[in-house]
Each structure stands twice: as structure tokens, then as C-alpha cells.
Amino acid sequence: MSLLIALSLRGEEWEECRSGPFEVWTNANEKEARQLLVRLEQVRHMVGVYLGKNDPVSLWTIRVLLRKGKNTPGTDFVLGRDAWVSTLPEGGVPSAAWIKQVAGMLFESNARRLPAYWEKGLLIFLSTLDAKGPRITLGAPPVMTERTLDWARVHYLATNVEYTTRFRVLMNNLQQGADEDVSYRNAIGRTKAELEKTIAAYHAAGQFTSVEVSGRAMSERDFYTRPIEAPRAAAALEDASGFAVEKQSLDWLKKTVTEGTNSARVYLEYGKRLTEAKAKQEAFVEAAKKNPRWAQPYVELAGMEKTPERIAFYLKTAAGLDIRNSKLWQRLAEMQLDAKQYPEASRSWFSAELAAATVEEREAIRKARRDFEAERARREDDEKRRIADERQRELDRLREEALNKVREAEARANKGQSPVASGAKVEQWWDEKTPSQKISGQLQKVDCMGKMARVWIAAPNAKAVPLMIRDSSKVVILGGGEAAFGCGVQNPVRNATVEYKPNPDAKQNSQGDVTLIEFR
């Protein structure tokens, strides 16, 4: 803490009142602090109305320091250790630009990407919001430089009783990535071109009036204040004066962590400075715990991983927290492609397209998405071929293994004759004058008959064919096993190819003798 700030705090008593993401601290007029909190909450309420959010959140606490002395300079919001921080003088009225900053922070934490001209217009429109308890005044014209066509477009729809509800529907449709022309027709009942013509005339006429609407039911009496410890007040003032976590030394970061800080930003910066992997990871995890809405700790954790699967695991969480970050969605999609998570990658590319900030960026992402789909199709085909090749190699190995067992059995039966070399033609034990036949279909039933068995196999759209297994030691089995020959009806039935020697046997109700069964 700087000496100047320490001296300025002598004899000062600070109090705070809170609601939602807002904290208003004051060493001056307590009532004024509560009135400012009401106004901030009504801004949040209207952001929620237009974005379709019941309770908009903020990535960081929004902290306002209402300081004694009418000549105290006000400051824009800056990101401190754990909050956006700004100072306002006692008795001062927040400027439209200041309110616009507040609305912008809420947009970043809650809105899916809207076309840029809608977002600009909405933020200017909200910047002049005024509130007295539950009554909100909307539509007061901003300074001339802000009375743009984008602002007039929102003003026309948001203050016109015919369109207020339809306007909210339009905002929701556009956040879902719907086509603009379709969204206009469905929500407003007019084409975009028709509405733009009306908006241009409205803007040119320059007759803009404000309206009163009902906000949240609240008043300054709903909030109470409580004392703030001097060290907290000093830290907040230091943050407002331009304190930057990123510029602090490793020793300062280590000391602050050791003292038990609640600042996610301190933990993240501390982890980035460390060199030992486990300690870095622990710091990033702690940063994520301190602020569960912050995506950056998960981005840092992803950067420590080696495999696309693990990288995608962390990036998926990060992108879900930072939904407006198109580059993050693209990086996730690329990792999911490398991890062969093809459906997930497609969804991430679509989210990247929705998050694009400009028409040009969206078109570039759409082209990249088409290229991805082509690459995905190629990789999926390669993967199918690889799996089929591996399966065929495994079947060939099992077939060779089974034939080797037959050769070994023949060698033992030949009483000392040399076994047939691997790869040589095997002289089968069955009558070569009767060639083998083959049938493919479903193995439906097995009739156990002592040492023999009768199997029933049905080709597609054909009756089951009964075949005999007279000696199981002379039947080659591929892809199955003894468990495949349970007696009775097979449940579930299995697909198989059976090679057999035709040998009609009316007594055994069989059309041939099985030599090989290959389950598929």
C-alpha cells in the first residue's frame, strides 16, 4: 500500500452496501450509496430483460468507491485484484459513459454475441437509464455524438408500446444465431429492409421521447451498510489508482498467496511465474476455485497438457464460461478434431461462428467450418478403413492360429511324421472329392446331442439350415469360443459364416458336416 493512500485513510471510516454483483463503498453519505445501488440494480434488471436473463451475473464484482469531497475526481472502471473498481465523488451524478461501462460489463458476462450494431445501440440506450426506486426512465436522448442510427433503432423498438415485447423476442432469436431476416419477420412481423427504412426516417425526424417502465420492486431502504476494514479499503483505493497484479514481483505474489488472498487473479499470475509443474497446476486450480466463472485458469491448465483429449477437456470448460470468445471455441474445435471427437468439434465450430464479433469474422469462421467438415469426413473415412484393416488382420491371425492347431493335431495323429510347415498347403482330413460349401447368416439354435451337436443357421430371407458338428476338435472356430455354443435357442443370435461339407443325413436331420465357423 502506498504511503499516500495510507495517509489519506487516516480518520476515515468506510461502509459498504451490496446487491447482486455490485458493491458500493462510501466514506461519505450512506443514503447516497444506497440510492446508487438501486440505480445499478435497475440497470442490471433491464440488461436481463433485453437479454432474456432472470438474474444477470458479472465475471468480477463491480465495486464503486463513493468518496467524500465533491472535488474528488471520478475514475473509469479498472480491473483490480478481485473486482472492477471505480471512484465517484460525493454528490456526483454518474455519467452516461460510466453507466455504459457497467452495462458493457454485464453484457460481456451474460450475452451471446449479437450483431455489433445491436450491441452498440443497446449500450448507448441503457447509458441514460435513470431510476427512482422501482420506477425506471428509459430513452432519454444521449449527447448528440451518441444519437446514432444504432441507438435510434433500439430507441424506436424499446419505447414503442407496439414493439417492446417483440423487441425482446428479436434479441433472443439473434442470440441463438438465427438468420436476421427470419428473426425480423418472426419477431417484428416486418422484413429487415422494411424496418430499416422506418428507422432511418425516425432517426432523421429527431423526435425522441423517454418512457417510464416498472423495474424491480426495490428502494434504498432495502439495503443496509456495514463497516469495512481499513486494509480492504486501502487495497480497493490502490486498485482504483492503477494497481496492476501483472506488474507485481514474484516475491509479492508469493507473500500474498501465503497470507491467504481471495484473489483469483493473484493465484493465476503466481502460477504463471512458477516453473515447477505441480505447483503451477495447483495455483491455476486455486484460481479457478476463487472465481468459478473465470475461463482463464482452465486455458492455462489446458496449456500444460500434452494430448488433444486432455487439452480439449479443459478448453471445453473454458469456452463454456467465455461463450463470446470465438477464438477459444475455434481452438477447442481443433483439439476435438485431433482427439477424434467429431460431433463435439462440429458443435464447437458452430459456437465459434455464433461468437464472431463482426460479419467478416463470422464469414471467415463459416468457411473454416466448411473446411473442417471436409477434413472430418476424410478422417472418419480413414478411421473406418483403419478399424476394418485391424479387424481383418486379427481375423487372419486367428485363422492362421486355428490352422496351426489343426497341423499340430495331424502331426500327433501321424505318429511321428513331421508337422506341416507354416504356410504350406494343409491336406484336410475330410474327403477332398467333396468340396466345401459356405453359408452366412444368423446362428439361431444349437441342439446338443452328446458328443455331437446340430447347429441351425439362417441366411437372410431364408429358412434355417441344419448342419452337424460330429467332432468339435475338428471344427475351426474364429471370433467366438465355446461359450458361443450354448445349447438351445441362441439369445442373442449371432452373425456367422459356416463352412461345411455337404452330407445329407435324414436320420440326424442334417444337410452337411461343419468344418469352420467364423463369428462376425
Image (cartoon, grey):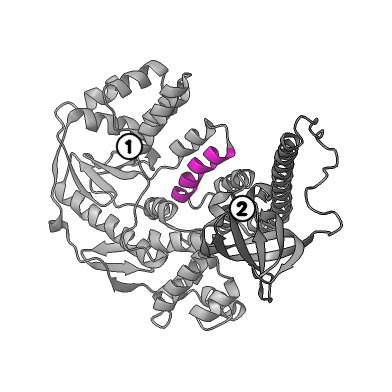
Magenta part of the protein: which range? 308-322
Q: Quadrant of the N terminus?
A: top left
Left or right: 410 as drawn, with respect to 86: right
User: Compared to 13, does 313 lie above or below?
Assistant: below
**x and y, in percent, of residue 185 in the image:** 55, 80
In front: 486, or 21? 486
Q: Quadrant of the C terminus?
A: bottom right
Q: Which mark is residue 342?
A: 2
In percent of the image, x 65 and y 70: which residue is there? 507
Element under label 1?
Answer: helix
Quarter of the image where one finds residue 501: bottom right
User: Compared to 453, does 399 lie above or below?
Assistant: above
Q: Residues within 10 Å of mark 2 (few under 14, many from 20)?
A: many
Quarter of the image where one finds residue 192: bottom right
Badge 1 is on which residue?
Answer: 290
Note whether residue 242 is visible: no
Left or right: 281 as drawn, with respect to 425: left
Q: Amino acid at mark 2?
A: Tyr
Left or right: 267 as drawn, with respect to 354: left
In percent of the image, x 75 and y 35: which residue is there? 411
In percent of the image, x 73 and y 56: which residue is there? 374
In front: 193, or 138? 193
